[in-house]
Image (cartoon, rainbow, N blue to C red):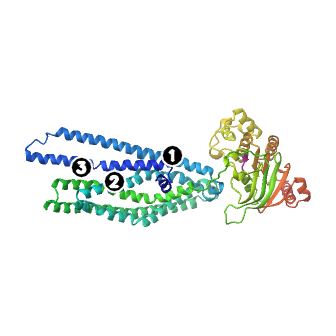
């Protein structure tokens, strides 16, 4: 049963068990709330008897007072356990749900993130989870429990008097049909409303990410106009969804009141014909008044759960996404990287980014991947670290297929400097220390100095304890890149991937960092991606990628002498440099 609930509601195993537990406690509380009717009936019976026997109505006062107090204590205790089972368990599952999604996202290949934008994933982590918190704390368990408890109470009423029970309960299936029967229509407008609100979130996220371009191109008015339009559409969608859902729910709730009228009519008929005791008639009236309240709430909760399917489906889509897995026992024979007839495309139906790519990056050598933009250089480097899995062919590290190794285990052997540097809102010291958690301050400072961070850090007011803002907003591109290089040097892994690592540095700093890199990268397997030919002049091997294929490979001297593409690239850059210098003169 718990497995079924896990799948239906995208719960953890514990969350499914807690749902069953909270539902049972809610059923018990719903049934227990019928107990006061018994106390009221007993009190009325006492009053009626006292008029016949002449006994004082207050003779059993303390008995019924004690019963009422005991009943209140019982209800308090039952609701206490219900609260603990319902709300505490829901919020615990909420935390587990968020952690579970984060764990799943951590293990997914980068191809997944290429298909989903940041705002959509953020909304799933925050908004969808918050909506499900509300569903599981206020709606879903209450709906299930109300259905069970109403069925039990209904059976008891039918046992006591089937005519009165029918008079009370006949409106319930009609009200349910009005609510559930219009589910498709409510789903339609509810889903539209959610998607329209999501469009507003996406637009705001896009605005925050591109605010510099919006200001630079004077697009503030057009951006705000589009945001206003999307907001109005979302507002209209909300109104329509609420109107459609509210109309049917209100109609169903109003129809329940008809049951009171039929209960009175049937009850009076039964009493006048002598088939029903007046006291039991009052009991059925109390039961009708009591039973319609949770049913009315159930109708509201049923409508509220209709949209839960969309949130659950989005959650389940992430949870059931195939994750990258592999062995954690990785013992490579050296650190040579071998590409053997590798093909890869970001979407299975598009033309491949890499086509039959084969080359060897030897340990202790610097292998440079060069070529025109879009040739597949960055893709090849990321495939080597198993950010994606190759579509065909094989990539090995030390003779071991990287697709068979757990990604986190594999990445312990890689130090990577991306073209797009990512820094955290923390101090410079802690941003560098991310390369190797637990590194001493002396080791961090040594890596920072080797990457020439000391030059700009020493002029900052807090030195290495300076907060650098969101993604290093207070630093220049070159300063951010040097921190990223220091982070990679601190990790000191046997394999280093440098994706345009010095692209944001001036000539003087580039030369200094190149010297530091050449000294600290000795004996490692190094893959460099670069467009500047002087950056790869000292490489041991050049692999030219053009349109996803290996156009040529060899040493720089060999390619300058016998190659075609590499020599042409060098000549073009030399001509461009000469033209620039000539115009500046």
| Identity of the residue drawn at 53% across and 48% down | 98
Q: Position of residue 318 (x, y in %)?
A: 57, 55
Alpha carbon separation for disc pair 3 and 2: 16 Å
Cβ–Cβ under 8 Å for marks 3 and 2:
no
| Identity of the residue drawn at 35% across and 44% down | 79
Image check: 133 left or right of 36? Answer: right
Alpha carbon separation for disc pair 3 and 1: 40 Å
Alpha carbon separation for disc pair 1 and 2: 30 Å
- List the residue tagged with mark 2: 149
| Residue range corresponding to the magenta coloring | 415-419
Q: Earlier in the sequence, mark 1 or mark 2?
A: 1
| Identity of the residue drawn at 17% across and 40% down | 61
Query: Per the image, is 190 magenta?
Result: no
- List the residue tagged with mark 1: 95
Q: Position of residue 538 (x, y in %)?
A: 86, 48
Res 467 quadrant in image: top right
Q: Is residue 198 above or below residue 517?
A: below
Few, some or many C-alpha atoms within 10 Å of disc 2 (few <14, some 14-19, many ≥20)?
Answer: many
Few, some or many C-alpha atoms within 10 Å of disc 1 (few <14, some 14-19, many ≥20)?
Answer: few
Q: Of the numbered discs in the image, which one, if any, rests on residue 37?
A: 3
Res 245 quadrant in image: bottom left
Q: Magenta span: helix, strand or loop, mainly?
A: strand
Report the mark closest to the observer, 3 or 2.
2
Q: Is residue 4 above or below residue 467?
A: below
Q: Earlier in the sequence, mark 3 or mark 1?
A: 3
| Identity of the residue drawn at 20% across and 41% down | 64
Number of marks in picture: 3
Residue 458 shows up from this direction: no
């Amino acid at each position: 049963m718990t497995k079924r609930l896990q799948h239906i509601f995208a719960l953890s195993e514990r969350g499914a068990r807690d749902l069953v537990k909270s539902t049972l406690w809610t059923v018990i509380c719903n049934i227990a709330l019928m107990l006061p009717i018994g106390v009221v009936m007993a009190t009325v019976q006492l009053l009626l008897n006292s008029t016949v026997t002449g006994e004082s109505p207050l003779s059993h006062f303390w008995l019924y007072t004690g019963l009422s107090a005991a009943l209140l204590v019982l209800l308090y205790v039952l609701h206490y356990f219900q609260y603990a089972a319902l709300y505490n368990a829901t919020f615990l599952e909420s935390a587990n749900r968020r952690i579970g999604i984060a764990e799943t996202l951590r293990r997914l290949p980068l191809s997944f993130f290429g298909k989903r934008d940041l705002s959509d994933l953020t909304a799933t982590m925050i908004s969808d989870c918050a909506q499900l918190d509300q569903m599981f704390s206020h709606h879903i368990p209450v709906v299930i429990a109300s259905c069970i408890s109403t069925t039990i109470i209904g059976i008891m009423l039918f046992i006591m008097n089937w005519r009165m029970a029918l008079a009370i309960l006949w409106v319930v299936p009609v009200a349910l049909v009005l609510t559930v029967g219009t589910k498709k229509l409510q789903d339609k407008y509810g889903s539209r409303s959610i998607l329209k609100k999501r469009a507003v979130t996406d637009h705001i996220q896009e605005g925050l990410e591109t605010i510099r371009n919006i200001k630079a191109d004077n697009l503030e008015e057009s951006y705000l106009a589009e945001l206003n339009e999307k907001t109005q559409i979302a507002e209209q969608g909300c109104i329509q969804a609420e109107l459609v859902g509210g109309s049917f729910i209100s109609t169903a709730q109003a129809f329940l009141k008809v049951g009171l009228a039929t209960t009175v009519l049937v009850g009076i008929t039964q009493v006048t014909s002598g088939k029903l005791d007046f006291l039991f008639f009052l009991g059925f009236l109390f039961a009708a008044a009591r039973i319609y309240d949770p049913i009315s709430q159930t109708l509201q909760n049923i409508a509220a759960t209709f949209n839960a399917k969309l949130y659950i489906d989005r959650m389940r889509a992430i949870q059931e996404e195939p994750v990258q897995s592999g062995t954690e026992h990785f013992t490579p024979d050296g650190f040579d990287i071998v590409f053997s007839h590798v093909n890869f495309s970001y979407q299975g139906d598009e033309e491949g980014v890499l086509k039959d790519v084969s080359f060897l990056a030897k340990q202790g050598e610097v292998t440079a991947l060069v070529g025109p933009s879009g040739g597949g250089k960055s893709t090849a480097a990321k495939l080597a670290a198993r950010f994606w899995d190759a579509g065909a062919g094989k990539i090995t590290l030390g003779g071991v297929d990287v697709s068979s190794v757990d990604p986190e285990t594999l990445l312990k052997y890689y130090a990577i400097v991306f073209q797009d540097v990512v820094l955290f809102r923390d101090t410079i010291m802690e941003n560098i220390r991310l390369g190797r958690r637990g590194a001493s301050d002396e080791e961090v400072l040594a890596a920072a100095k080797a990457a020439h961070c000391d030059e700009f850090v020493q002029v900052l007011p807090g030195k290495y304890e300076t907060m650098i803002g969101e993604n290093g907003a207070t630093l220049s591109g070159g300063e951010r890149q040097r921190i990223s290089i220091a982070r990679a040097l601190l990790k000191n892994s046997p394999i280093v991937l440098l994706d345009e690592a010095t692209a944001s540095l001036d000539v003087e700093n580039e030369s200094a960092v190149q010297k530091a890199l050449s000294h600290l990268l000795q004996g490692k397997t190094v893959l460099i991606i670069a467009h500047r030919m002087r950056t790869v002049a000292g490489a041991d091997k050049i692999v030219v990628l053009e349109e996803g294929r290996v156009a040529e490979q060899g040493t720089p001297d060999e390619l300058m002498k016998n190659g075609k593409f590499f020599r042409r690239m060098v000549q073009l850059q030399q001509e461009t440099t000469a033209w620039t210098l000539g115009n500046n003169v």
